[in-house]
Image (cartoon, grey):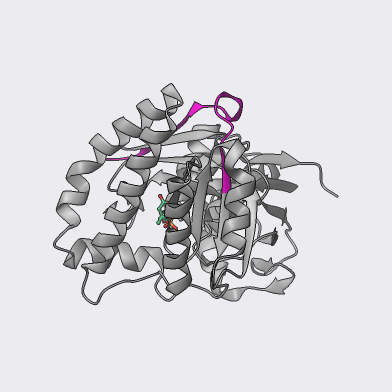
Amino acid sequence: MQAVAQAQPNIALIKYWGKRDVDRNLPAVDSLSVTLDSLWTRMSLEFDGQLQHDALEVNGVAAPAMLQRVSHCLDLVAGTDRAFARVESKSNFPIAAGLASSASAFAALVVAADDAAGSGHGKSALARLAGAASGSAARSLFAGFVELTAGDTRIEVCSISDCASWPLEIVVAVTAEGPKPVSSTEAMIRSARTSPFYSSWLEQQAADLQIARDAVQQNDFAKLAAVAEHNCLKMHSVMWGSRPPIVYWNQATIACMETIRALQADGHGVFFTIDAGPQLKAVCLPEAGGAVRAALDQTSGVLKTLHSGLGQGARLLEPE
Ligand code: PMV
């Protein structure tokens, strides 16, 4: 009745933005991501017949605001007739600030809950259950380069290349640590309802994904860089064109983009991507990682940088 699981965040290179079905949390578009290794969320979970309600602690502090989503996810994995659960989540990076903490949290949660309840869902089923809680979480079940296909009624997720085939590195420039002003769900709904660019975003996604998939299979960094930056800036253009507009960037985000442009001009293998928050994620060839981190550390407004390789999907840990 007790289990511990770990998952790492993933960073989308071809973004999920928009929902086909809000109630079932089905994405409107396919996406492609990389799973990280050195940032993690560890989720300890115990079903306990003595409890009167579910209880959640995040980094040692009670987190009632997130409890409803966690309880719903537990119902999906273990059934609504389950015992109540004590859940403790710990992350070694800032949460709710565009660093995909909900992805690693829900990926770890479904793996721990499945084991503790003895539900025996396979990995694909667990990815769907994680995705029902947070669309991007489905990808953190898998290692390396991960593709999510958004069907009409369910998603399919698979790893298209492992970490060793192309050991890229990620440097995250943290530019603000508070929670984001607008949740990604609310922002996606507003984008779909009000942005004049939303329909072209949907139309072009398959073409972007095909280019990125080819680039990953050919280890073609320049090709991946061009399509990933384009896809990211297009997603943010959809948001900027929404009413009221959704702008997740701050001055330091832009300063980081300038740093990346300067590194590229000097011949370093690096490109950027930005999610629903002000952090910039630099994707680098291994030989560029050190220079990229040093340059982002020197960039005005950067609070700190985090450095990661590519890693494994969500998995069980031995309880402490
Ligand atoms: O999984 P959610 O609902 O937090 O949405 C994540 C959306 C982006 O991070 C902006 C893009 C992505 O594909 O991860």
Looking at the image, residue 67 sits to the left or right of residue 265; the answer is right
Q: Quadrant of residue 186?
A: bottom left
Give percent across and percent down for residue 169.
58, 41
Tell me residue 260's x, y (percent). Answer: 46, 54
Lateral position of residue 234 relative to residue 10, left or right: left
The stretch drawn in magenta includes residue 168: yes
In x, y percent, where is residue 130? 50, 48
Up-down relation of residue 111 to residue 250 (above or below): above
Question: In the figure, 167 relative to 234: above or below?
Answer: above
Q: Is residue 316 left or right of residue 273?
A: right
- Where residue 178 sits in the image (x, y, percent)? 55, 75
Residue at x-position 70% and y-position 53%:
42
What residue sits 50% from the left and 26% below the top? 161
Residue 80 appears in the rendering: no
Q: How many marks?
A: 0
223 or 50, nearer to the observer: 223
**Magenta stretch?**
152-170
Q: Is residue 121 above or below residue 265?
A: above
Looking at the image, in which quadrant does ligand 1 appear? bottom left
Q: Which one is nearer the viewer's eye here, 190 or 177?
A: 177
Looking at the image, which residue is at 41% across and 66% down?
254
> Does any portion of residue 203 appear in the rendered image?
yes
- 167 within the magenta span: yes
Name of the residue lying farthest toward the front: 266
